[in-house]
Image (cartoon, grey):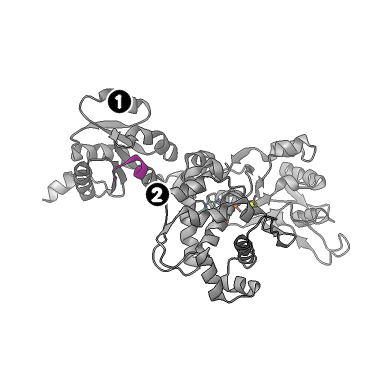
Amino acid sequence: MEKTEKDLPNLSGLSLLIVDDDPAIVRSLKRVLTGLGADVTGVSSIREARLSLAELLPDAVLADLQLKDGTGLDLLPDYLSQNPDGGFYMITGHGSVGNAVEALRQGARDYFEKPVDPLLLAKRLVTDFTGKQSVRRSSDLLSPYLTFCDPVMNEALMDVVRFASSQEPVLIQGETGTGKELVARALHGLGPRAEAPFVAVNCGAIPETMLEAELFGYEKGAFTGASRQHKGRFEQAHEGTLFLDEIGEMPPSAQVSLLRVLEEGMIHRIGSERGIPIDVRVVAATHRPLEERVEDGLFRQDLLYRLNVLLVQLPPLRERPRDIALLAQHFLANSLRDVGWEGSAPTITSEALTLLENYSWPGNVRELRNIMARLAVRLPEGLQEIKPNLLSPLLTTKNNNVTSCNGGVFIPKDTTLADAEWLLIDNALKESGYNRSKAAKLLGIGERTLRRKLNES
Ligand SMILES: Nc1ncnc2c1ncn2[C@@H]1O[C@H](COP(=O)(O)OP(=O)(O)OP(=O)(O)O)[C@@H](O)[C@H]1O
Ligand SMILES: [Mg+2]
């Protein structure tokens, strides 16, 4: 008995997705491979497989060629782009060797003819995966920082783990709300400086006259009001990472000083001639392409070259539809937890997901998170499905962009009474940080009335 167990392939720690529309095949493979220690999920269609791939990131996929909504080969490019170290194996029927060869050409590791011998498969998996499980995939390493599954985002983030161990500056470009700060935190947290401080400076938010004092510090008496010595952000970030957010907004004089610091590895506090060596890794972010700022004469080309050694370009949310579905579920579950929802989160129907996928997301992931927070506070208790009618009022331009106007609420000419009420409620929710009782106070109504109105709309 003992001997037999030793001879059997050991698949513990290996996650495997089987895609086959014949339930008998899935059942029998699952039984044997689970018995050998693998964590096996079985699905019967391409659609289900795509969802499972995003959720599970399995080490290996075993897919049938003929499925009711496509061929197993359709999954291969996405899977390998998400998981370049993964193993993709085809199941083929009699006489479909041509297709199997095509699969190999596209990157599949092997193919197995039906009926698949589970032990043969298990041995092949052991050969392919022994010793590799300890190599954590880059998407696993990034998952504490960012939630994503779309191949477009995978590609954009492909280099982040590698960049994390480098000491060169990184420039992160992407529209507002695409996750630039999260990437900066990942670069810090996954690198050798993780234990040292991460210091963020928003170059667009600090008055021009204060920025250099803020970055480089000053000596007592350096200028009127400098009543004592002050260490700047560079010194505060010693041995760690300095995140220069909205670098494109940096005024020209500070750009000159920053370039000098990057070249010399030293700062000078304002009011002092003494150079202080600094050991800081610089990560910069911008929501508009710096090349454009250079062309407009607002950003120094030499500083751009110095900062742009390693570039991470984050795609807007509208260009990564699979992330929309994943993030919507993720934020909805989080927001429901925040409002004390009991039981499991309602599922977002596929029609509702299509609605989300077709929206333009000018505010990117931040906007999606806010919309899910707004949705969560207005969900009737016990609801099981989110249908498009619950989402569409939150997605119109009217509700997203025009509600606030000079600190008040802008109500367009043709607004109905019901819509106007919703605009006021929506604004009160935003103003109160989505706190229902505060929003009710702002509106001059009781919380129960607000709850009822939210449930009605
Ligand atoms: N991939 C992601 N997974 C989870 N949360 C995300 C993701 N991307 C963005 N977010 C969330 O969206 C919000 C905006 O992200 P972040 O601040 O990193 O964006 P940004 O690109 O720096 O935006 P801005 O240009 O406006 O400063 C944050 O609440 C962040 O947690
Ligand atoms: Mg930011």
| Residue 54 position within the rendered picture, expressed as x and y whole percent measured from the top left | 41, 46
Q: Position of residue 275 (x, y in %)?
A: 78, 50
| Rendered image: mark on residue 28 | none
Give the left or right position of residue 125, taking residue 439 as reference.
left
Secondary structure beneath label 1: helix
Taking the spot 38% from the left edge, 43% from the top edge, the residue there is: 50
Amino acid beneath label 2: Glu
Q: Is residue 337 magenta?
A: no
Residue 265 in sight: no
Residue 235 vs residue 400: left or right? Answer: right
Q: Amino acid at mark 1?
A: Asn
Please give left or right for residue 149 compared with residue 94 in the image.
right
Q: Decide which of tag 2 and tag 1 comes sooner along the chain.
A: 2
> x and y percent of residue 141 in the render?
47, 49
Label disc, if present, on residue 99 of the rendered structure: 1
Tell me if residue 27 comes above or below residue 431 in the rendering.
above
Q: Which residue is mark 2?
A: 55
Dot 1 beta carbon under 8 Å from ligand 1:
no
Q: Helix, strand, or loop for circle 2?
A: helix
Residue at 29% x, 31% y is 110
Q: Residue at x 62, y 51 (%)?
A: 397
Q: Nearer the viewer, residue 345 or 139?
A: 345
Region of the chain picked out in magenta, as a range:
43-49
